Amino acid sequence: MVLLDFSMTPLRKGESVSQYVARCLEVVAASGLEYRLHAMGTTLEGELDEVLAVVRRCFEAVQSDCQRISCSIKIDYRKGPGGRLQSKVQKVEALVGRPLKTGDQG
């Protein structure tokens, strides 16, 4: 099981690229994988082939009207069951003894 954090940014599309982020999040949500959107990207949880396929579909959705795209990807693999998208945060919160600000808060 992996956590994959990515940020995809079209270049030369102005100061705000939120419309492209929204386009990617439609792809991410349709994938059925667990995910968290945060201020600097999106984290997916799943098998390696699954999460990479979602990133590829996001790239294809943005590529349709962008001449240049920058994409950063960070992958954390750990053998065993899923659920780390939440459990990693919960463990740190337990260590500090209080809830922390996370992407889950709205």
Image (cartoon, rainbow, N blue to C red):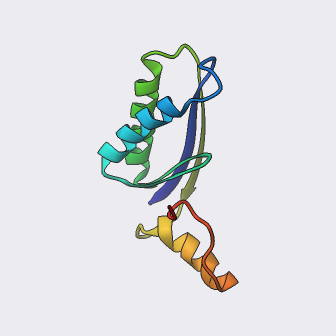
Please tell me which residue is depicted at 50% across the width and 63% down the height of the picture: 104
Q: Position of residue 67 (x, y in %)?
A: 55, 13
Where residue 32 sits in the image (x, y, percent)? 30, 51
Task: Identify which residue, 48 or 27, lies in the foreground.
Answer: 27
User: Residue at position x 49%, y 36% from top?
Assistant: 21
Where, quadrant-wise, is the N terminus in this rendering? bottom left
Q: Nearer the viewer, residue 87 or 79?
A: 87
The total number of labels drawn is 0
* Relative height, residue 86 to residue 103 (above, below): below
Residue reaching furthest to the front: 106
The image quadrant of residue 16 is: top right
Q: Report the residue at 37% width, 46% height from top.
A: 50
Q: Is residue 37 above or below residue 93?
A: above
As drawn, which residue projects farthest toward the right? 96
Q: Horizontally, is 45 left or right of 91 in the view?
A: left
| Residue 84 position in % (x across, y down) | 49, 68
Q: Residue at x 52, y 50 (%)?
A: 4
Q: Position of residue 63 (x, y in %)?
A: 46, 20
